[in-house]
């Protein structure tokens, strides 16, 4: 069987864009990304220096300080759910990051998922969306079989908003089901209890394989204040459920440690006892390598204006090791590009939208817009996705899509059926899938290309992402269609009515454009994280490493026996 036929792709930046055009595109992006960086810092500050000082006065570390000490020195933190509840008010209060930090970090050379209550925000209480965010992190860990570390310092539900986080299918209690599923599937779980651990917070660590408690920690179904009210007993929470009780009497915890630093050291030692990452084995002797073209150049190659086209090959050339790529089935469905490259020395499948005007195979000499799904492209990505699943290759979806082709011909060609085939494939795949919303993520195309409803392990947005059924202008036209002629001009000649329609259309367009803001999606957990374009390569390196870290839960074939080779031969044979 032939080896993977990687070929160089991409061109030097100077051959794609002149200095002025590149600088202008980069500057337009940086304005948006400056806002992203500013908002990240505000979230990371929690409730501010006063509350950090309160934590320190108790001789404790903040949640973010604990993560810094837990992780391997000099390694990055890949946070998810940063903007949960962003811009949302609960009375006069905000809950930065929904009061919990969830992040992929490297500990003792292995990636783990860390879930840490932010003790600078209402003593680590659970707000609306906190349970859903924790569960999302647990599901990511389950899908990748990553050890899961709970840094617990939780005062329970934020009671004034309990109705938004207590009940329902994804209410706080569902966290404990996720604990159980992780345990049942053999995913290591380690809990460190640093302080308050009340009610639901008390249940959260118990199913973990190892539970540590500091001298300031306690785990209780009900705290001292509630017991005083219910039973008129004057007793402290430490008396009720401190380490003296749970380590030495109840057995609900395993080890008693003096302080935060000692506990974090103990967790690092536990993680070091786990099997090492299998990623080096799956590299097969191939070391990690940078792309031939700097990945930071992506900043000036993806236009801010979603109506402007760019070459997706140039983006792939700045994501793949050595800028080498094998494009599968290049002669079919040119609006889509499917192929395989190495990221950090590990095989990754890519599926992406081509932009601009493309040849229309049904009408020689004619063109049709890229960024849409047509029959051949849908069939191609279905077959490619299915083959990657069979071969155990993780898939990265790079979305910049306007939706499905529409109209009489599209329906006659059976696009509904082909789309259903793709949806079935993506719904049943077992290989890890990751979705990046580069710019447009529109309509059913967003679904078909493994949008969040189809359970990618992680969905990333950029500051350019626009997630919606349709854009504001198109929706305004659709809303007022009965008032417009065939050229979308207002029909009435009555000045007052005309002005009212204009105002209404402008209001609809403005509202939809606001709703398409990636911070709105991130605030609602409709996307997992907003990243800078220059951060895509580091994120993909981490994604690839995590996909290959664990063994024994999915089939990863060696590249001699890939189904992709057979698919390529069959396609070439049909063409011949």
Image: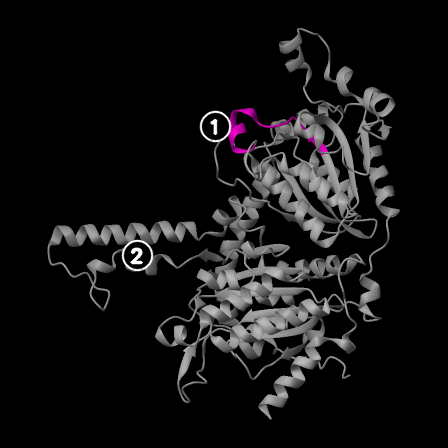
Quickly name the residue at label 1: 92
Q: Seen in the image, is 341 located left or right of residue 251?
A: left
Q: Residue at x 38, y 52 (%)?
A: 512
Q: Residue at x 63, y 34 (%)?
A: 173
Q: Which residues are magenta?
A: 152-165
Q: CA distance from mark 1 to mark 2?
A: 34 Å
Q: Nearer the viewer, residue 294 or 383?
A: 383
Residue 267 location in percent, x, y?
83, 39
Residue 11 location in percent, x, y?
61, 78
* Rendered image: mark on residue 476: 2
Query: Would residue 210 be visible to someone looking at this image?
Result: yes
Q: Tell me: residue 554, above or below residue 563.
A: above
Residue 561 location in percent, x, y?
77, 77
Q: Nearer the viewer, residue 381 or 298?
A: 381
Q: Nearer the viewer, residue 295 or 18?
A: 295
Residue 88 location in percent, x, y?
48, 37
Q: Seen in the image, is 239 located left or right of residue 525?
A: right
């Amino acid at each position: 069987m032939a080896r993977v036929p990687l070929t160089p792709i991409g061109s030097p930046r100077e051959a794609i864009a002149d200095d002025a055009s590149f600088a202008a595109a980069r500057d337009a992006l940086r304005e948006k990304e400056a806002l992203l960086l500013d908002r990240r810092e505000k979230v990371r500050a929690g409730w501010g220096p006063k509350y950090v000082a309160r934590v320190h006065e108790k001789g404790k570390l903040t949640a973010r300080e604990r993560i810094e000490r837990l992780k391997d020195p000099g390694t990055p933190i890949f946070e998810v759910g940063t903007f949960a509840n962003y811009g949302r008010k609960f009375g006069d209060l905000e809950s930065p990051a929904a009061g919990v930090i969830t992040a992929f970090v490297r500990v003792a050379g292995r990636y783990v998922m860390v879930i840490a209550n932010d003790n600078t925000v209402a003593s680590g209480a659970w707000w609306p969306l906190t349970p859903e965010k924790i569960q999302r992190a647990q599901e990511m860990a389950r899908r990748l079989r990553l050890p899961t570390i709970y840094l617990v310092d939780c005062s329970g539900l934020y009671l004034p908003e309990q109705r938004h986080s207590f009940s329902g299918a994804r209410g706080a209690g569902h966290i404990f089901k996720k604990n159980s599923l992780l345990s049942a599937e053999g995913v290591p779980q380690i809990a460190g209890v640093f302080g308050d651990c009340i009610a639901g917070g008390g249940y959260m660590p118990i199913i973990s394989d190892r539970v540590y408690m500091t001298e300031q920690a306690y785990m209780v179904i009900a705290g001292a204040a509630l017991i005083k009210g219910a039973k008129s007993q004057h007793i402290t929470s430490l008396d009720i459920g401190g380490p003296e009780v749970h380590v030495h009497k109840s057995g609900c915890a395993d080890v008693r440690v003096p302080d935060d630093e000692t506990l974090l050291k103990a967790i690092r030692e536990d993680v070091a006892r786990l099997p090492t990452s299998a990623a080096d084995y799956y590299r097969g002797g191939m070391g990690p390598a940078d792309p031939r073209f700097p990945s930071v150049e992506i900043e000036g190659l993806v236009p801010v204006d979603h109506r402007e086209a760019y070459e997706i090959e140039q983006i792939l050339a700045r994501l793949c090791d050595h800028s080498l790529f094998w494009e599968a089935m290049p002669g079919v469905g040119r609006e889509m590009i499917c192929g395989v490259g190495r990221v950090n020395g590990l095989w990754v499948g890519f599926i992406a939208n081509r932009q601009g005007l493309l040849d229309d195979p049904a009408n020689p000499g004619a063109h049709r817009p890229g960024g849409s799904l047509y029959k051949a492209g849908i069939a191609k990505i279905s077959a490619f996705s299915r083959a990657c699943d069979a071969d155990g290759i993780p898939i990265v979806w790079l979305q910049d899509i306007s939706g499905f082709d529409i109209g009489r011909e599209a329906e006659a060609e059976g696009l509904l059926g082909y789309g259903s085939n793709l949806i079935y494939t993506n719904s049943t795949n077992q290989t890890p899938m990751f979705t990046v919303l580069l710019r447009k993520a529109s309509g059913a195309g967003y679904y078909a290309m493994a949008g969040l409803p189809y359970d990618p392990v992680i969905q990333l947005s950029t500051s350019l992402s626009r997630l919606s059924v349709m854009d504001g202008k198109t929706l305004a036209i659709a809303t007022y269609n009965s008032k417009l002629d065939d050229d979308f001009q207002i029909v009435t000649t009555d000045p007052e009515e005309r002005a009212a329609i204009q105002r209404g259309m402008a209001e609809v367009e403005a509202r939809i454009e606001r709703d398409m803001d990636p911070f709105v999606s991130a605030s609602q957990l409709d996307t997992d994280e907003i990243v800078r374009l220059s951060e895509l390569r580091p994120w993909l390196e981490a994604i690839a490493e995590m996909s290959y870290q664990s063994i024994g839960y999915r089939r990863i074939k060696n590249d001699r026996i890939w189904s992709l080779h057979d698919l390529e031969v069959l396609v070439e044979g049909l063409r011949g």
